[in-house]
Image (spheres, rainbow, N blue to C red):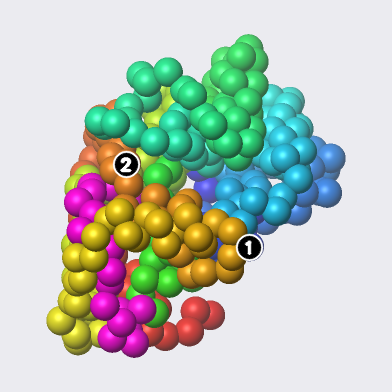
Amino acid sequence: MNKIIILGATGFVGKNLVLYLKNSGIVIRSIGRNEMSFTNEFLKTDAIIHLAGKAHDLKKTSNPDEYYQVNYELTKKLYDAFLKSGAKKFIFISSVKASADSVLEILSEDDLPDPKTHYGKSKLKAEEYITMQPLPEGKSYYILRPCMIHGPGNKGNLNLLYKFVQKGIPYPLAAFENKRSFLSVENLCFVIKSLLKKDIPSGIYNVADDEALSTNEVVGILSESVGKKPKLWRISSKLIRFVAKIGDFIKLPLNTERLDKLTENYIVSNSKIKKAIISELPFSAKEGLKITANSFRKPIV
């Protein structure tokens, strides 16, 4: 697999993946959403990686139809083109949110999907379309459900948490005891490269780092990266939730959804993908977070 088409190469994951694959000698062709009718390009490629999508909108200002137009209709169009093309492999980056918005124990691929948001529902609809199509001989598809991805260029909640730590602001949510899975973009890139290089059964695969970490542990790693001792405040969780509810109605740095993302339990099993690629991941969860933390200190080019 030496010639790859990527849709969504300009995003956070895309930029990291393009660099990673190019360093492995793989030729990358990036296409935009309006170029998919150019099936001649698909005839010349070995694999198609679909990264493009509409991310979950925490501010809830998006029109629900946008999720289905981008996450479902776009995927449908691209997968149909793949089935008619000479490409052998199709990799679709979905999300664990296509399976569940909250997790009581450990999320696996065997759990019955029950997404609650339009984001998760649109991703699941795209997954279902892919799995329902007859697959021509010699072709394979891989639906990856990553958990919270982080790495160089990441601008999500980890970046916000890093800024608090960098300024010496105490972390006020230490009273919440939680464990959640993370995914370093380096480990995700490694998994994608493995899927390109090896013959692996088509299917749905969760992707996560090996260890689940508490947010308090994450604060400790981020603090270490800036040479500070972690400042953990164990303020009453009831008081914090009350403040977050106020943040749902007025503009505050903390609202209920952001609080849940920072403090929820969300553990994802990666055993299926590791068994499929027959390999350990390059970085532990803590090592991956250290790489991300160090990247926050310098501009991304």
* Front residue of this view, candidates 43 and 114: 114
* Dot 2 crowding, Cα within 10 Å, few <14, some 14–19, many 20+: many
Residue 8's place in the image compared with 65, above or below, is below
Where residue 288 sits: x, y (%)?
A: 28, 62
- Can residue 179 be seen by looking at this rendering? yes
Of the numbered discs 1 and 2, the one sitting upstream in the chain is: 1
Residue 156's place in the image compared with 145, above or below, is below
* Front residue of this view, candidates 231 and 141: 231
Query: Which secondary structure, mark 1?
Result: loop
* Front residue of this view, candidates 250 and 169: 250
Residue 71's place in the image compared with 187, above or below, is above
The answer to whether 256 appears left or right of 278 in the picture is right
Where residue 292 sits: x, y (%)?
A: 35, 69
Q: How many marks?
A: 2
Question: What residue do we see at 49% from left, 24% from top?
Answer: 114
- Can residue 174 be seen by looking at this rendering? no
* Front residue of this view, candidates 251 and 208: 251
Question: What residue do we see at 40% from left, 57% from top?
Answer: 242
Res 197 quadrant in image:
top left
Range of magenta residues: 164-190
Tell me, yes or no, whether the highlighted magenta stretch contains residue 184. yes
Which residue is tagged 2? 266
Tell me, yes or no, whether the highlighted magenta stretch contains residue 104. no
Where residue 90 sits: x, y (%)?
A: 57, 34
Q: Which mark is residue 131?
A: none
Please, what is the three-letter code of the amino acid marked with disc 1?
Thr
Which residue is tagged 1? 10
